[in-house]
Amino acid sequence: MKNKLMKKSMAVILALGVATVSFSGCGKKEIAFTTGLTKNELFKIDKTVCSMKSADVILLNLQREYTGLFGAGNWDREFAGSSIGAYVKQQAVKQLSQLTALSSLATKDGITLSKEEIDAVKNASDDYYNSAGDELLKKYDLEKSDVENVYKQYCLANKFYQKMIDSVDSEISDDEARIISLQYIFFSTKKTDDDGKQVSLSEEEKSNLNAKIASVIEKINAGEDFENLAKENSDKQTITMNIGRDETEAAFEKAAFNLTDGQVSAPVETEDGIYIIKCISNYDEQATLENKEKIYEKRCNEALNNAYNDYISEALTEFNDDTWNKKSLESDDDVMNLPDLFGIYRNYLKQTEVVTEQ
């Protein structure tokens, strides 16, 4: 029987609209800078143009979020290797380029919005527009059609994502997703020299270390408590871990996954040192189920990213660098009074959240 898995078509919305999630594979091709666009156009991907009005909707929403985090007018403050303002504008372009490309892919694939979805988009746009109020709408020159256009593109992007993940294999074996719980004792085979560099132990130090390891093994075989021995002898403060496949060095993984409950390994040599591993549980059922969902979501994102990158690598792209560089950010905290663009979207288009039981 297949396990219960979450098919999260809202990943597109979250990736584009929330800072905590992103498309790790998207955006590998740089958009070429050009002066061939009008002042009202930010960029073009293939034949699809992103307007400055659409950019304003996304950029204002990001300003609302980051003003809430860092306070008003702190755009020059250092952040993520640059400034907060530069980062916010970079994220806006990233979100907009992904949105434009994915909605364009949806259109190319013959995907359209149903009457119910069109009505939901209009209702969401009305809600945003009415929640913002006349004063803020006038201040930021926002039109209902600007918000509606962004919502339409999001809905198309989500439908494209849903179509992509429908073809993704959801069969994931217990062994592929298996999570095991371990305790370990770590013996470092490196030391820090006078220059602060990591270097190998001397022959004498290696001999002393081997004697220490042999003594610990003797105590384990004599029945002494493994956890106490780990606390007393390990060169790492942490002595427990839960791991899945492909998360550790090959030698460590092979030894750990071959252990049964309560079994202790022989010394395992890795690049940074030597481990003695004890298996607490060679199958954590709940953690394994959660890992199946993560593996499935990774497959879904990979399918989407492959489609995105195949498209963007072939598409002709242009970017209005001059206009974007001149785009200033809001200096006061009025932007925080704007409604949550994506929160409102999710209230009206919940049908894009699909859960299937398999």
Image: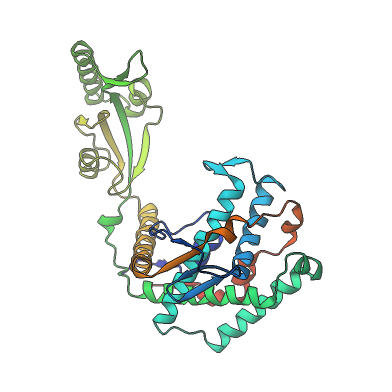
Looking at the image, what colour scheme do you see? rainbow
Please report the residue visible at 81 percent of the width from the left and 67 percent of the height from the top.
135
Q: Is residue 28 above or below residue 242?
A: below
Please report the residue visible at 30 percent of the width from the left and 69 percent of the height from the top.
169
Quadrant where the image shows the N terminus: bottom left
Q: Is residue 222 above or below residue 18?
A: above
Please report the residue visible at 58 percent of the width from the left and 73 percent of the height from the top.
150
Which x, y percent locates residue 78? 59, 39
Q: Quadrant of residue 52 in the image?
A: bottom right
Which x, y percent locates residue 50? 54, 70
Q: Is residue 169 left or right of residue 312?
A: left
Q: Residue furthest front?
A: 35
Q: Residue furthest top?
A: 204
Closest to the observer, 48 or 72: 48
Q: Residue furthest right?
A: 135
User: Can residue 10 be spotted in the picture?
Assistant: no
Closest to the observer, 297 or 87: 87
Q: Is residue 38 left or right of residue 278?
A: right
Q: Quadrant of residue 202 in the image?
A: top left
Quadrant where the image shows the C terminus: bottom left
Q: Is residue 70 above or below residue 208?
A: below
Closest to the observer, 157 or 325: 325
Which x, y percent locates residue 90? 53, 54
Please report the residue visible at 56 percent of the width from the left and 62 percent of the height from the top.
17
User: Can residue 229 be spotted in the picture?
Assistant: yes
Which x, y percent locates residue 337? 75, 60
Q: Is residue 337 left or right of residue 124?
A: right
The number of numbered badges drawn on the structure is 0
